[in-house]
Amino acid sequence: MEFQYERALINWAPQRLVIAGYTNKDQESVRHHIEELKELGIPAPRQVPMMYDLDPELLNNTDVISVVGNDSSGEAEVVLLDIDGTWYIGLGSDHTDRVLEAVSIQKSKQVCAKMISKQLWSFESIAEHWDEIEMNSWVQVNGKELHYQSGVLSAFLNPMELLEIVKQRGYDSPGIALFCGTLPLKTDKFYFGGIFKAELHDKINNRKITINYETKILKDSEVD
């Protein structure tokens, strides 16, 4: 994969992909979210935060993903990348099949590509003001754009604390890409298909990382 870091291009092949879930600092909020998911038929996690070990080949930084059926949606997440021993920050979308999620959360994530930004920052450059970084996402369905998620990274566990949990659980690996958790929805439901956009905004350094991709619905041979 090719990334832009400042004025340089980085070519990198991820060796491991881990999606961290339920990483909110506010554990009462986490419990509330779990109860909401249970009402939707999504099983409660065995422990929090949860780690989902996926195929790194799922990482994608193009502008289109393909899915079977119009039952999947994206969610914005900061991504930590270990590139040759240096930590970088990117922006990703943990695109997930919401029907399969009720059966197996890990399987629902494994069947969808994981979008990641082409642009990276060094983690060192934001470590001191991590909590102030803003993250937002939007969905565009039938020509209408909706503000989908909004918040700041102070909502999440500090990335170094999260990495320590990853290590304790046995998921650490050189060349890892770690999705660090997502924000609650501003809407009352998931929006499927269409266009998903997200933005990471570093006001201190006056810069942004963005992703913007379209979901292509494949022809389903099972219902044709």
Image (cartoon, rainbow, N blue to C red):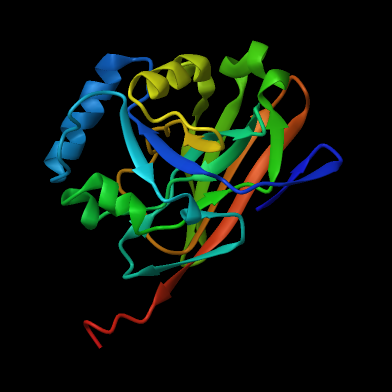
Q: In this rendering, is residue 199 above or below 130?
A: below
Tell whether 28 sits left or right of 193: left
Between residue 145 and residue 26, name the one nearer to us: 26
From the top left corner, tell me how far across and down residue 26 is, in percent: 34, 15
Q: Residue at x 39, y 77 (%)?
A: 218
* Closer to us: 82 or 130: 82
- Name the spot of residue 111 as percent of width and height, x first: 34, 59
Residue 102 point in image, percent of width and height: 17, 50
Q: In the image, is 172 to the left or to the right of 64?
A: left
**Left/right of residue 138 with respect to residue 193 in the rendered view:** right
- Give the image quarter of residue 219: bottom left
Q: Which residue is found at the position 61% from the left and 55% from the top?
A: 61
Residue farthest to the top, as pictured? 128
Going by the picture, which residue comes out furthest to the right? 7
Q: Quadrant of the C terminus?
A: bottom left
Residue 41 to residue 128: above or below: below
Question: Which image quadrant for residue 122?
Answer: top right
Residue 95 seen in the current view? yes
Residue 47, relative to residue 40: is it above or below? above
Left or right: residue 95 compared with residue 151 = left
Q: Is residue 156 visible?
A: no
Residue at 29 percent of width and 53 percent of height: 108
Which of the pair 117/207 is nearer the observer? 117
| Residue drawn at point x = 25 percent, y = 30 percent | 33
In the foreground, 33 or 110: 110
Residue 211 percent location from the top left of the image: 61, 49
- The answer to which image quadrant residue 212 occupies is bottom right
Report the number of numbered marks.
0
Residue furthest to the bottom = 224
